[in-house]
Amino acid sequence: MNNIMDNIVVFIIIQTLIIATPMMITAVGACVCELTGVTNIGLEGIMLSGAFAAAVTNISLASVMGPYIGLLVGMFVGGIISLIHAYVSIHLKGNQIVSGVAINLFAAGTTAFLIKTIYKTAGNTPQAAHLGNQYVVTILIYVVAILAYFFLYKTVIGLRIRAVGEHPLAADTVGISVYKVRYLGVLISGIFGGLGGAYLTTVMLPGFNNNMTAGRGFMALAAMIFGKWNPKGAIFASLLFAFGQVVADQMKASGVGVPQQFLTMIPYILTLLALVGFVGKAKAPKASGIPYEIYIRFYTILRW
């Protein structure tokens, strides 16, 4: 009996770590982006695009170049899309929320269209012949997430990132390029989001399905807020949300007398509870979501 319980506990821990991975690395990227003062609501679309790009790459090239090429392509696509968001938000001073929502809608529509155009099917791609080593890739992504914390809090560049998000005018005064730092932050969030999406179709599943990210990008934003814009907190929050999903899946498999729809809602309920309980207590970077020129105007008015 004890051995059975031990096996169940180990299984739940492993599954939690695996399921949390795409959400967690995306949440860490969101932390970097927000700490520069740019809000990236488009992470759901970036993850979806990365997943699709990785799936198409692996279907075509995995047998020749191995499945890991899909991870690189997913990261590249995520980075490109994030640069579009960066240009709209930083240079054009567009509304960052609207830009992010547009990316989400564009990604959902474009991936569905490309599936039908390329593979002549509706809803899903063919399956790739090979998947990456789940444990190796998972461990490497957790290492990257931990290194991101040290990058933000133990390096000069990390200090500049946080300075730009808290007080961009002061950072600019001492010679830090606000534009370059913000572009860097958004780019990192896109690369990490693309990696999170690519993980879904390179490691977890052999193919792509319409809207397969299933809100993971939004849950990553919730994990970022729950974690108080700190990668360590975002990692913990992602593990918590993933644990809820694993428990729900186990309850479904065991056939407990609870409606399936309610069990499916468990991770999303945890996300809502986290937001309700922590949004008011957690403080975002002071310049988050505000274009630099507009920030200067407000700061000048307040000083007068």
Image (tube, helix red, strand yellow):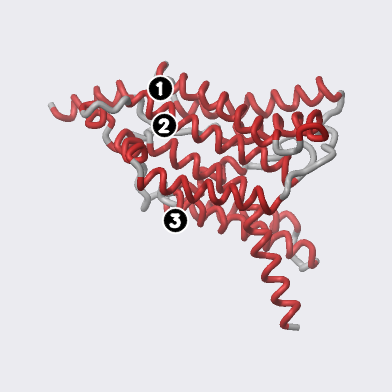
Dot 3 and dot 1 residues touching (CB under 8 Å): no
Percent x, y of residue 262 = 69, 57
- The residue at which mark 3 appears reads as 277
Residue drawn where x is 63% and y is 24% of the image: 106
- The residue at which mark 1 appears reads as 90
Q: Tell me which label, 2 or 3, sits earlier in the chain.
A: 2
Q: Count the marks: how many? A: 3
- The residue at which mark 2 appears reads as 38
What is the distance, in whole Å, between disc 1 and disc 2 at their CAs?
A: 8 Å
Residue drawn where x is 61% and y is 35% of the image: 194
SS assignment at label 2: loop
Q: Is residue 134 above or below residue 65?
A: below
Q: Residues within 10 Å of mark 3 (few under 14, many from 20)?
A: few
Percent x, y of residue 287 = 32, 34
For residue 300, side relative to residue 92 (left or right): left
Dot 1 and dot 2 residues touching (CB under 8 Å): yes
Q: Tell me which label, 3 or 1, sits earlier in the chain.
A: 1
Percent x, y of residue 87 = 46, 19
Q: Is residue 110 above or below residue 65?
A: above
What is the distance, in whole Å, between disc 3 and disc 1 at their CAs?
A: 31 Å
Q: Is residue 262 above or below residue 68?
A: below
Residue drawn where x is 71% and y is 31% of the image: 52
| Residue sitting farthest toward the left | 304
Residue 188: image tag: none
Q: Which one is nearer the viewer's eye here, 117 or 17?
A: 17
Question: Mark 3, mark 1: which one is toward the viewer?
Answer: 1
The quadrant in which the C terminus is found is top left
Question: Mark 2, mark 3: which one is toward the viewer?
Answer: 2
Q: Tell me which label, 1 or 2, sits earlier in the chain.
A: 2
